[in-house]
Structure formats: structure tokens, C-alpha cells
Amino acid sequence: MRVVRSVVLGCGSYLPEKALTNSDLAQMVDTSDEWIVQRTGISQRHIAAEGQTTSDLGYNAAKAALDDAGIDASSLDLIILATATPDNTFPATSVSIQHRLGMSHGAAFDVHAVCSGFVYAMTTADAYIKAGLAKRVLVIGAETFSRILDWEDRTTCVLFGDGAGAVVLEAQEGEGTVDDRGILTCKLRSDGCHQKKLYVDGGPSSTQTVGHLRMEGREVFKHAVGMISDVVDDAFSETGLTADDLTWFVPHQANKRIIDSSAKKLGIDPQKVVCTVQKHGNTSAASVPLALTEARRDGRIKTGDLVMLEAMGGGFTWGSVLLRW
Ligand code: ACO
């Protein structure tokens, strides 16, 4: 029986020009390069220029992904943007990107699952493709977290950065085995009882302001490794694959200690872990496609590789996507 899979045609990313180093931050708040590197693995992050918006970053990543895929936006039928930092409360930021890509056909919408946003958007795209509702989908993760940080709060402002990444998915038929290219399985979870551990203290309906990110860092850390391991193990159980079968593990880039502990718990060889958090900080929904694109561009990820994506973030939300590149 022929089975439809969502196959990656190409990927791309974009980072704002300005890099903010740990030493720069030490001039702004009471922190040090040593503290930040030791606790998080982060050395620098990129910050959007004044007036540069999430749609600007997302558009540039989208263009790069379309170029990599060798296709034109006219052949897309859906754009899904994962972001928690939209240009405006509405319309959806994806619609701005759709317009800038010269598209007036198809549909575009945003998904909001904070740091798990890209995994949620990939899962949604895969569902559209499998249901026969779309053939080519552009999935973007783009964020300007610098706009929702309290730059006087050293416990949060050192952790995050701005950026965007994108992937083009296409419906292709195969035998439906784990050796076929495309998304093999997606696992999503959320649990709203953890809302107050990581949230933004503003919004249109509550305060009529944008608000600032607030986090109980230790609490997030405490739950992260277990939640990540659960959804990765679920993906392995469903497919019959194991950590040894993976070619690459591309985790959400929040914190090197969370990444290392998750890989260790899952029995994944450290050589297989793609880590970019040192250069980008935590870019929320952009972090997985930024890491994917880096590993693809430098030749690590090749056609046929088995790649596990995972993320965990505000909500809490968490999820995994297992795919054959
Ligand atoms: N520089 C220097 N000192 C600091 C800083 C800083 N930037 N931030 C906090 N400290 C101090 C604290 O004030 C505290 O001082 P005290 O002992 O005098 O009270 C001390 O360092 C220890 O603080 P803790 O919060 O206990 O430090 P911890 O070891 O837990 O590390 C961290 C903090 C890095 C935030 C850690 O809890 C963590 O990584 N949590 C996960 C957070 C995360 O990754 N969130 C994002 C994931 S979800 C998503 O992506 C949206």
C-alpha cells in the first residue's frame, strides 16, 4: 500500500546582525560570562535591530528555505508560522510573510506553543499533508524574544535571543516503512497546570500590554528532562526504532545542561547531538530549525539520515518529531 509522507525539501535560517555577548550583558546587569556559560552553555545571542520584526526574520528564513528546496512560493499551498512574539496581536504574522513572498493563494496561520512551537507547527503541517489538504507546506519558527524580556532581570535576560528558521515539506508517496523519507511520527503534549512556571505577565485580554517573560528557572529545569524523554521514548516505541538508530538528535536549544541530561537519559551518543545554544541562546520556536539548518549546511545531516527533533516550553508544552531526512 502506498503511504503519503511529509518529506523535507529544504531548510533555511536567518539571524539578525547584532550579536550580544555575555560580556556585553555583564555591562547591563550583575552577571558574568563564567556564570552564564557554566549554567547554560550560552556565549552569545543575536538581537533584532530597532524596527526589525518577527515577520522580517521569518521572511528571510522562508526565502532561504525556498531557495534550498529549489522551489518558488507560488507552489506552496500553506504557511504555518510558530511564534510567541507576533508583529501584532492580529493579523497573524504568517499572513505578512505570505504577502511578502508574493502569495495571494493558499492559506497562512500562526501556531502558538512557545518554545515547542516549531514541533507543533511541523505536526500540524504533517496532519494537513497526510489528510490530503496540502501538498507543499512552509513551516517557519521565528521569534523576537528580546522584545518581551525584562532587561533588568538577570535571571531571564541572559537566556534568550532572536532568530528564525524554516523548512519546506512536500507530500510524497512511499511504502510506509521506517526507511522511507519523511516524517515518521509526531508526539505532542501539554499540561496547563505548569502555566505560572514560565509565562509572560501581560497580554491584550488581561493587561492590554505586551508584558515581560517571567520564569521559575529551577522548576522548568526540574520538569524539562523527564518531559522531553517521555515524548522521544513514545516516538521510539511507536516506530520500533531506538536511540542507536538515530543519526542526529536536534533538541530545542534552551540550555546545554538540559540538552546533555536529556541525551544521557535517552542513551543518545553525545556525538549525535546538534548543539547551537552557545551561539544563539534560546530562540524559542526558532531554535530547532536554526539548529537543523546549521547541521544541514555544514554537511552533517544527509539524505536518508534519521533525525529526532524535540522541544519543551511555556504552558508547559512539549513534543517530538521523528523524521527520515
Ligand atoms: N548571573 C549571575 N547570577 C545569577 C544570574 C545571572 N544571570 N541569574 C541568577 N543568578 C543567581 C541567583 O540570584 C542565585 O543567587 P543566590 O544564590 O544569591 O540567591 C544564584 O545565581 C542561583 O540561582 P538559581 O536560579 O538557583 O540558579 P540555577 O543553577 O537554577 O540556574 C538557570 C538558573 C540557568 C535559569 C537554570 O535554572 C535553568 O537553566 N533553568 C531552565 C531554564 C530554561 O532553560 N528555560 C527555558 C526553557 S523553556 C523555554 O525554552 C521557553
Image (tube, grey):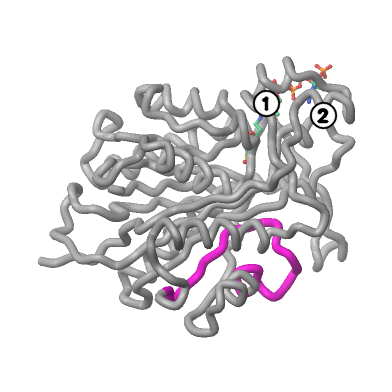
Crowd around label 1: few <14 · some 14–19 · many ≥20 (10 Å): many
| Element carrying mark 1 | loop
Q: In which quarter of the image is residue 171?
A: bottom left
Q: Quadrant of residue 117?
A: bottom right
| Residue 87 magenta | yes
Say which residue appears at 81% left-offset and 59% top-offset.
51
Give, as a three-letter code, the residue at label 2.
Answer: Leu
Horizontal relation, residue 83 to residue 177: left or right: right
Q: In terms of depth relative to the viewer, which is nearer, 212 or 287?
A: 287
Circle 2 residue = 25
Number of numbered markers: 2
The quadrant of the rendering that contains the N terminus is bottom left
Q: In which quarter of the image is residue 45?
A: top right
Can residue 191 be seen here? The reply is no
Circle 1 residue = 43
Q: In terms of depth relative to the viewer, which is nearer, 148 or 137?
A: 137
**Going from the N terminus, do you reach mark 2 or mark 1 first?**
2
Can residue 172 be seen here? The reply is yes
Crowd around label 2: few <14 · some 14–19 · many ≥20 (10 Å): some
Residues shaded magenta = 76-95
Q: In terms of depth relative to the viewer, which is nearer, 204 or 283?
A: 283
Ligand 1 quarter of the rendering: top right
